[in-house]
Image (cartoon, rainbow, N blue to C red):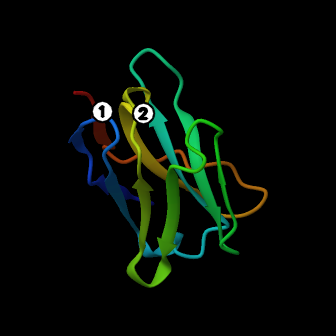
Amino acid sequence: QDHFVESGGGLVQPGGSLRLSCVHSGSISSAYAMGWYRQVPGQERELAAQILDTGRTSYIPSVNGRFTISRDNAKNTMYLQMNSLKPEDTAVYYCNARLSRVSAWLDSWGPGTQVTVSS
């Protein structure tokens, strides 16, 4: 069973910063890809950022240049540094992984961490 536990969310004013953490089971440390999803009530969960085992990163346009994803396999932890936050970044953030290039994202989700950007 693969497990994720997200933390670091909270209430922040527009323009502020937060750093999210995702602790995962050791079996995921060598995953082909890891990513941060976010979900707004009533909307589909979207993949906001991902990082490959090579270190290559990619982001959706709305967060590119403001968010930075990183992973520390030795600590079984992934991070999302979020700067210049906007109200539209408000969502529950989840982490997940793809174990190989041909596998789908895992059907196992943690509790998520709520990020609220509001003045």
Q: Which residue is mark 1?
A: 117
Report the front residue among 25 and 49. 49
- x, y percent for residue 105: 61, 49
* Left or right: 16, with 32 as reference point: left
Q: Which residue is mark 2?
A: 89
Question: What's the distance in space between the residues labelled 2 and 1, CA to CA?
Answer: 7 Å
- x, y percent for residue 92: 36, 35
Tag 2 near tag 1, CB within 8 Å: yes
Report the front residue among 88 and 91. 88
User: Which quadrant of the rendered structure holds the N terminus?
Assistant: bottom left
- x, y percent for residue 43: 49, 19
Q: SS class of the residue under badge 2?
A: helix
**Mark 2 vs mark 1: which is more N-terminal?**
2
User: Which quadrant of the rendered structure holds the C terminus?
Assistant: top left
Q: Amino acid at mark 2?
A: Asp
Q: Residue at x 30, y 32 (%)?
A: 117
